Image (spheres, rainbow, N blue to C red):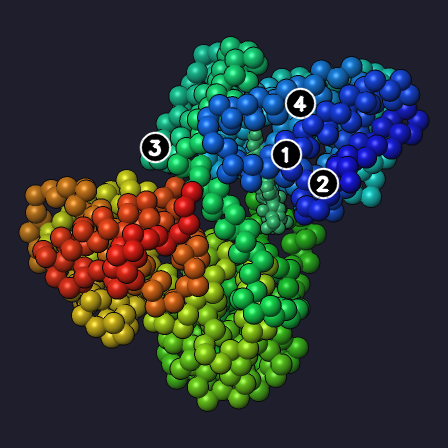
Amino acid sequence: MPAFTTDVRDGIAVLTFDLPGEPVNKLTAGVKAEFEQAFSALLADPSVRAVILASGKPDTFIAGADIEEFTRLETPAQAEALSRGGQEMIARVEASPKPVVAAIHGACLGGGLELALACHWRIATDHPKTQLGLPEVQLGILPAAGGSVRLPRLIGLRAALDIILAGKTERAAKAFRLGIVDELVHPAILLDTARRAAGRLLRDGRPSRPPRGTGPAGWFLDRTPPGRRIVYAQARKGVLARTGGHYPAPLAALEAVEAGLEQGPRRGFETEHRRFGELAMGAVSRELVRIFFATTALKKDDGGSGARPLPVGVLGVVGTGFMGAGIAGTAVAQAAVEVRLRDAALDRVASGLKAARKLLDGRLERRRITRQEHQRLVALMGGTAGWEGFRRADLVIEAVFEDLDVKRKVLAEAEAGAPHAIFATNTSTIPIGRIAEGAGRPGRVLGMHFFSPVDRMPLLEVIPHAGTDPDAVATALAFGRRMGKTVIVVADRPGFWVNRILSPYLNEAGHLLAEGTPIEAIDAAMTRFGFPVGPVALLDEVGLDVGAKAGGVMHAAFGDRLRPAPVLARMLEAGRQGRKNGKGFYRYEGGKKAGPDPAVAGILGVQPRAAISAETIQQRLLYAMLNEAAMAMGEGVVRSARDGDMGAIFGIGYPPFRGGPLRTIDHLGATRVLDVLRGLENVYGARFTPAPALVEVGMRNGRFTDEG
Ligand code: 3HC
């Protein structure tokens, strides 16, 4: 079956791209050859005067270059050739004597947008599935099929850098405002509008688009060489601050944009393919591409049983605190599901609804949803101090106070109030099996562990207990994904996965503090390693009371190995709870973090010690986490190293370019990790005793993740 079909009417050909046997259209080597053949035939056909490029897929226009092909590249020269080939194909479209109109519905990403940018007119549907963007830097590469050159020329330097350097994707309406697309239409009239546009282009010629850059400042910064020099310098500084120098792709993209604008398109294209050749073969891109494929694989996860998820039309949320409201608001915003929010007192229900609604308001303000959509979503939320409305609930998520008896009581009431619902408990420390004990329908009980703040944290842990039904697991997984989360299934062991591997890491930060290591030295060492925040700042964010409680649970479950350093207890005695009460390891001024608090040394009763090296700090903290990850993996807390690594990246912000903790062990080599751990064990004792799973992998010279 061909990937392209042609339908010519009244001199206008619709060239429809529908890659057989694939869920999305992507630009492969084979597609390129077919496209060139089909396109040349249209150019040669005298009955064809204009071409419309459309997609036959329901939700994708073109998802970009075939990322799988990247994994088979063996040399930079091959990668460079791949990019050059794409550029040439796209250049032929731009140079076509017959006008070409892109009729875009669905994802138009990477090479897909780059192809559209070479067309002479772009029409997009105003539909949530229509997203346009250049996500390349998120894969550790740069737009290398002409996008780094064409986008800045089309929409102005600053607007283009905003998209390219962050790997952003925009909704169609925003793309229209920016000038990426020329028209915005309802999907039903996409092709008709494209035909009319083709007719106009034939009649009036190609449009001349005025250069972008509004107002005197915009004119200066986008359109004059000295202004642009300022923009390049600032962008570079911004990228370095954001990436800590760990990600080469945005800098390479910046170089290509600059070359394209300052030295002309040819130099821009050359820079694109040269840098693509280097980056596609580099270690960072390899890791980021693995993460892309792991994310897509997780989208299909049903828990391994083959069970089908049940539909969730009505969600009940019990508990209207920060978590409950966050879950309710995120569920409505992302899954457009009807939500019933319950708490014991009406005033608490009202404040929960208000907080949930705030999330929707934020989306409206950021123009992520229309006013109409906002109204519709707000109307989907209702609250109660009883159990009204829960009878129809398909899923109930409970986020009440972290206490076993309270949770069991809520479960018993929910079983009566929501008789056919699956019951999910959002707990970070209580075993799900304990909560399910005494349940009327224990098979319908499981854990859904969200992270705070729910709307922003991308991970969800789904935790079946020994008796959870497979379809309940599949339903929780599917609903978590509808909420926009990356979801992993984890075992019902204390701390599950994320808090388990975080626990010794945070404890080690506590030990360092107790030795007098300066707060800023600890945090700076770990952000330099690539974490988004340091462990001490993280404790402040999470709340020192919450951290101490979780630490206590882990200590009780795993014994001395996970004994917390006494620093959190001291801080709590001094009334410090972290950011939430404006007093933690850091100072807070007007809600903003304002540097480490010098009073902390006094509270902890330590003498600030002379600087200890960043390498030592990194080693102690990192190896505590790596060892725990290996141990938990060995205990079957996660089903695969892939899940473990994804959990660490999306749950903790483990540096993506390092691929996750288990991947880091493989990169370092298990035997080397063992050696370092034994050295640390000699100095600091049994908390660094190597995990049995690590010893086993080391002995057979094995790995946790596959090669490549
Ligand atoms: N290459 C290879 N496979 C791709 C792909 C791509 N660009 N885009 C999607 N797929 C595959 C997925 O791996 C998945 O495969 P599977 O069914 O075998 O597991 C399948 O298509 C469906 O994808 P999703 O499950 O992700 O479907 P969704 O509907 O949830 O999302 C999407 C669709 C928005 C297109 C999303 O897949 C996506 O974001 N894709 C990646 C887009 C991207 O990064 N493009 C840039 C590529 S790099 C490039 O173009 C370089 C150029 O500048 C030279």
Q: Is residue 514 above or below residue 342?
A: above
- Between the C-alphas of marks 1 and 3, the distance is 31 Å
Marks 4/1 in contact by CB < 8 Å: the verdict is no
Neighbours of disc 3 within 10 Å: few (<14), some (14-19), many (20+): some
Name which of mark 2 and mark 3 comes first in the sequence.
2
Residue topped by disc 2? 19
Q: What element does badge 4 sit on? A: helix
Q: Are marks 1 and 2 in contact (CB under 8 Å)?
A: yes
What element does badge 2 sit on? loop
Question: In terms of depth relative to the viewer, which is nearer, 453 or 132?
Answer: 132
Is residue 461 at least partly visible in the picture? Answer: no
Which residue bears the numbered disc 1? Answer: 28
Q: Is residue 318 left or right of residue 376?
A: left
Q: Specify the amino acid type for callout 1.
A: Thr
Kind of residue at disc 2:
Leu
Can residue 124 be seen here?
Answer: yes
**Can you say whether 292 is above or below 644 in the image?**
above
Residue carrying label 3: 245
